Amino acid sequence: MHRAVAIIVHPGFQLLDAAGPSAAFEIAEHFCPGSYRLAILAPDGGEIESSSGMKLAAAPLADAGAFDTVIVAGGEIVRSMAAAQAIVAWLARTEARRTASVCSGAYLLAEAGLLDGRRATTHWASSDDFARRYPRITMDAERIFIRDGGVWTSAGITAGIDLALALIEDDLGAHVARRTAQQLVVHQRRPGGQSQFSALVELGGRTGRFVELIAWMRAHLGEALTVERLADQAAMSPRNFARAFAAETGTTPAKAVERLRLEIARTAIENGHAPLESIAETTGFGDAGRMRRAFLRGLGQPPQALRRAARR
């Protein structure tokens, strides 16, 4: 039986927010015929212009039937307040087994009351604003995507593909999700617990202020990287450094160090055969037990599981 999937767009939507999940469901349907039926919807239907100027043809929300899954694209959600209000009203009265958002689409789910009392995520650049606007929602900008009951939210743009792969896995199992990811030529689905912070830290923060420090941290991960040592490297007092670093990257220096170690260790685990104890030592975790706990916190899986998955 087909699962009806609706992707909701609006004037100024981000094209990849819609196209990424659409491609994932299309490929999953190819592997398991009869699994999905896709529809692109918009308040009034017609040709809807994305933020890039490209357009998608959409059916009107008023003509929509029942859907198993509804995904709301993000983008310039305030370009048309009338469209945003129409989507919010539709979401509030529509009954679907799963409702999801990509990037700033989370704002529309929040306005519809679907996220009250739940955990959610959105693009890191909007996370502070979102948290201020919706204090009843627990914002977790560290996540690529979050599932809280029947409501799913995801981070910016390409995270919509991760979200779609997770939904496919939920429906059809890990094997089909993995084959879909391979066909999309994306690295096997990132777990929802993987942090958004990686891209932000790689850029040295919102303004690039700490780009040289991040490069230095990567080169010295096997050493003790205390706040005091990092502050000294940045030529700042520890207190001012900790405050500035958190403001720039959205995370503390200690968490940034752990995330960088996780990335390097994960690459070594998935692509090599070195013993876990050796990897833990060279990446600064000290021992395999401490590294395992960090993997469970940060990635939701132990190192051994990631190595087995990579070998498969």
Image (spheres, helix red, strand yellow):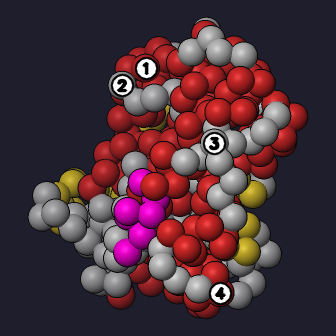
Q: Position of residue 219 (x, y in %)?
A: 48, 46
Quarter holding the N terminus is top right
Of pointers 1 and 3, the one earlier in the residue sequence: 1
Does the magenta-highlighted stretch encompass residue 85?
no
In the picture as drawn, the residue positioned furthest to the right comes out as 289
Amino acid beneath label 4: Arg
Span shown in magenta: 209-215
Q: Position of residue 214 (x, y in %)?
A: 46, 59
Q: How far apart in space, not on screen, are marks 3 and 4 (Cα)? A: 24 Å
Amino acid beneath label 3: Gly
Q: Which residue is mark 2?
A: 185
Is 239 situated left or right of 57 in this image?
right
Q: Secondary structure at mark 1?
A: helix
For the residue pair 157 and 81, the one nearer the viewer reads as: 157
Q: Which residue is mark 1?
A: 182
Q: Secondary structure at mark 2?
A: loop
Q: Which residue is mark 3?
A: 222
> Is residue 154 visible to us here?
no
Are the residues at dot 2 and dot 3 in contact (C-beta closer than 8 Å)? Answer: no
Instruction: Name the residue: 57% across, 15% down.
Output: 272
Q: Position of residue 152 (x, y in %)?
A: 63, 55
Q: How far apart in space, not on screen, are marks 2 and 3 (Cα)? A: 32 Å
Of pointers 4 and 2, the one earlier in the residue sequence: 2
For the residue pair 257 and 292, the one nearer the viewer reads as: 257
- Position of residue 113 relative to residue 199, above or below, is below
